[in-house]
Amino acid sequence: MPIRNSRIRTLTAAATVALALFAWAPATAASWDVNAEHSHVGFSVKHFFTPVQGDFTEFEVELFYDAGDPDASTVEVTIPVSSISTGNSSRDGHLVTPDFFDAATYPNITFKSTSVRSEGDRLIATGDLTIKGVTREIELPITVAGVQEVPEQMRQMLGATRVAGFEASTTIDRGDFGVGTGSWAATVMVGGEVTINLSIQARN
């Protein structure tokens, strides 16, 4: 009888360890490191009738994605406002002033997902976008461009076993965040709608 009880305890312990490993493995597999050198965060807004393109040269992205359970995904983005670039240094200098982003007071733009749902071939990340101290809930549609295994001979060089691509785009009203609303010139000349585009390469 003692031998049987001992065997049961051994099997129970083994099952507990197996369950713990099973629960731990997906979280590790779904944590992705973003390759900033092959990623891009940009925007487009009209100046009168002509679209002006810009981007942010610095950003941080924390990404959790599991193809087997995409609805459990999370994404968090932090963008330093001072890294804005439109190809015009005078304009860039104006954009970081209180007339627009007021980077000295509000140095970062952030987005933090609160939920993610599958919708056809896309993921829709609902979350809080904060610009200039104002937080609004938005939906960010995300397309998974692809997930690819890294050839074994390249894994040490890349420090990864898989590479994935994600593309996202959404349009916001800058007036909702108090950006450029205090200047008549900014209100008249610069369009209210701003399209934000993200192209992210990640690996794990």
Image (tube, rainbow, N blue to C red):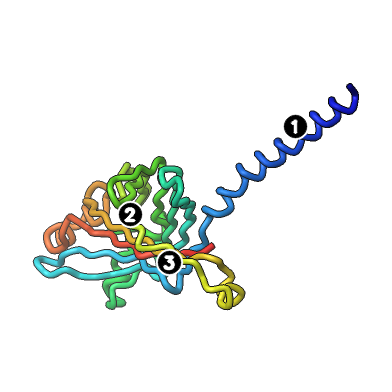
- Using the numbered discs, state the Cα–Cα distance from disc 2 to disc 1 in whole angstroms: 42 Å
Q: Nearer the viewer, mark 3 or mark 1?
A: 1
| Image position, residue 83 (x, y; %) | 40, 68
Which element is circle 3 on?
Answer: strand
- State whether residue 60 is above or below residue 19: below
Q: Residue at x 38, y 43 (%)?
A: 116
Residue type pointed to by label 3:
Gln
For this view, does 27 lie left or right of residue 147? right
> How packed is label 3: few (under 14 Cα within 10 Å), some, or many (20 or more)?
many
* Of callouts 3 and 1, the N-terminal one: 1
Q: Residue at x 37, y 61 (%)?
A: 166
For this view, does 138 lie left or right of residue 111? left
Query: Is residue 136 visible in the rendered structure shown here?
Result: yes
- State whether residue 202 is above or below residue 174: below
Q: Are marks 2 and 1 in contact (CB under 8 Å)?
A: no
Dot label at residue 142: 2
- The residue at which mark 3 appears reads as 201
Which element is circle 2 on?
Answer: strand
Dot label at residue 62: none
- The residue at which mark 1 appears reads as 12
Residue type pointed to by label 2:
Ile
Q: Residue at x 45, y 74 (%)?
A: 37
| Image position, residue 186 (x, y; %) | 18, 61
Residue furthest to the right: 2
Residue type pointed to by label 1:
Thr
| Image position, residue 76 (x, y; %) | 45, 52
Which element is circle 1 on?
Answer: helix
